[in-house]
Image (cartoon, helix red, strand yellow):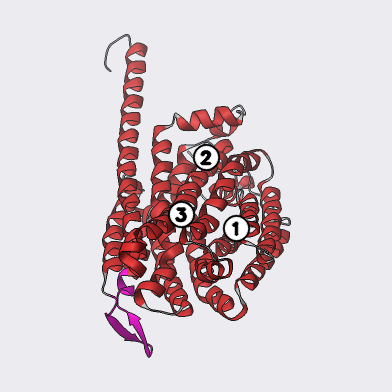
């Protein structure tokens, strides 16, 4: 049952406007992540760094600090005004991203990237917690998908416009250009009215006693469907983020494109189709779960299966196969890149929406922070670093083609994510069976052991 009190319902125009503002903030912070993909080669040349070192600065240095501060940021969002938490985070992110642009050495750049992670750690948990209070459960997957298209839009901007800025004005200017808009967004967020916490939830769910962070984490861990779900999200992101970070470099090395061409293709083809796929899967989830809840997990499973096929074909497609597109020779492999982009993100809206339905309103930000920490550690931290290390390891045997096969190995994580989603479904069925058995026992006791 949803609350019917109109006084706590945010007007439609304000809900959509706040969703747009949250998506803009998320987009800009992700541009700061994704622009690293077109900075790998120039930074590597300037500081004489290896692929492993570049995997560190583009991933693990950020992810480690993000993980350390992520749970605390989620806790703040569950206990304080989320608009204030978001505005402070945005200002910290903007200042530290500027610092990246003025790094005087590789070590300084690594340290600056670690500081950026502090500012970004509260963005996703605070935003998803607010979106859950803006939209009812049967419209939430599409709303979260709209918010979650930010990374795909960021890929388009970072890989195309970002590649142009980096190529013409240098990688330092890229960081400076990205940092400025976020401070303006922070000022607007401070003027926004926050939605009432728990607006669309059962009244009893909003009156629970406040738990400590440790107790909240324990209760979340014992919720088996949630536990398997965040592992599925982390594994889904591990291979996907590594692929996204190294894709432009792969096109340069294995398909002979220049940096700007590779950035534009990776951004518009991969990012554009991913945005469409995310919106479509969120829209489809909201409509199909009304008929049967099982679609919430079937849609991500189907997307992963199609994504594995498309990704494998893309990475193994011959480099000498090209087609004419708008007067330019383009690798025909980009068809498979587009298909992978469309299907690989089908898990985001359904899974994030499912998390908001599994946990209570006063622990949603912590629940999302746990998910985001795991996703960041595996996807942003381990993924790019592991692919870079594998590329270095295989380089003596495969030369420039080592990156192609290291990306192929990274795709195994998607298959593991499918196994975790199966575990979520099993855990839900077991929980439902136990609940039904408990209800039957109560009924038998009430009727004195007679079935009525």
Q: Which residue is mark 3?
A: 385
User: Residue at the location (62% across, 79% down)?
Assistant: 169
Secondary structure found at label 2? helix
Residue 242 left/right relative to 218: left
Q: Which residue is mark 2?
A: 367
Place of residue 110 in the rendered image (x, y in percent of width and height, measured from the top left): 60, 56
1 or 2: mark nearer the eye: 2
Place of residue 409 in the rendered image (x, y in percent of width and height, measured from the top left): 32, 55
Q: Is residue 154 visible?
A: yes
Q: Is residue 139 visible?
A: no
Secondary structure found at label 1? helix
Give neighbour class at mark 1: few <14, some 14-19, many 20+ (Cα, 10 Å).
many
First reached walking from the N terminus: tag 2 or tag 3: 2
Residue bounds of the magenta highlight: 319-336
Residue found at the far bottom of this picture: 327
Secondary structure found at label 3? helix
Q: Which residue is mark 1?
A: 22
In the picture shown, does residue 362 fall above or below 104? Answer: above
User: Residue at the location (44% across, 28% down)?
Assistant: 222
Residue 222 left/right relative to 84: left
């Amino acid at each position: 049952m949803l609350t019917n009190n109109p006084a706590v319902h945010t007007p439609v125009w304000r809900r959509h406007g706040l969703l747009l503002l949250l998506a803009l903030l998320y987009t800009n912070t992700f541009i700061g992540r994704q622009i690293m993909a077109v900075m790998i080669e120039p930074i590597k040349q300037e500081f004489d760094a290896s692929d492993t070192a570049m995997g560190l600065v583009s991933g693990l240095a950020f992810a480690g600090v993000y993980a350390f501060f992520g749970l605390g940021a989620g806790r703040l969002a569950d206990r304080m005004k989320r608009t204030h938490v978001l505005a402070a985070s945005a200002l910290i992110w903007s200042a530290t991203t500027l610092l990246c642009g003025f790094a005087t050495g590789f070590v300084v750049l690594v340290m600056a990237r670690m500081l950026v992670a502090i500012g970004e750690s509260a963005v996703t948990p605070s935003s998803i917690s607010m979106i859950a209070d803006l939209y009812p459960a049967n419209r939430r997957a599409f709303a979260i998908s709209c918010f979650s298209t930010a990374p795909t839009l960021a890929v388009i901007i970072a890989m195309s416009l970002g590649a142009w800025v980096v190529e013409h004005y240098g990688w330092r200017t890229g960081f400076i250009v990205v940092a400025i808009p976020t401070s303006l967004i922070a000022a607007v967020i401070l003027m926004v009215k926050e939605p009432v916490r728990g607006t669309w939830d059962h009244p009893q769910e909003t009156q629970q006693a406040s738990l400590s962070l440790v107790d909240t984490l324990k209760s979340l861990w014992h919720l088996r469907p949630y536990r398997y779900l965040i592992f599925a999200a982390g594994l889904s992101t591990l291979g996907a983020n590594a692929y996204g970070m190294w894709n432009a470099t792969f096109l340069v090395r294995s398909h002979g494109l220049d940096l700007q061409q590779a950035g534009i293709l990776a951004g518009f083809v991969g990012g554009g189709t991913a945005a469409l796929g995310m919106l479509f899967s969120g829209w489809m989830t909201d409509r199909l779960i009304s008929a049967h809840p099982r679609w919430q997990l079937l849609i991500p499973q189907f997307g992963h299966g199609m994504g594995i096929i498309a990704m494998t074909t893309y990475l193994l497609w011959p480099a000498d196969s090209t087609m004419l597109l708008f007067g330019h020779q383009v690798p025909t492999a980009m068809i498979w890149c587009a298909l992978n982009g469309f299907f690989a993100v089908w898990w985001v809206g359904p899974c994030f929406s499912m998390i908001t339905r599994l946990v209570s309103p006063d622990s949603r930000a912590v629940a999302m922070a746990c998910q985001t920490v795991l996703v960041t550690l595996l996807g942003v931290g381990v993924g790019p670093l592991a692919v870079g290390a594998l590329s270095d390891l295989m380089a003596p045997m495969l030369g420039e083609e080592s990156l192609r096969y290291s990306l192929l190995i990274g795709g195994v994580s998607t298959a593991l994510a499918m196994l975790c989603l199966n575990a979520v479904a099993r855990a839900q069925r077991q929980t439902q069976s136990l609940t039904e058995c408990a209800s039957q026992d109560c009924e038998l006791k009430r009727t004195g052991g007679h079935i009525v």
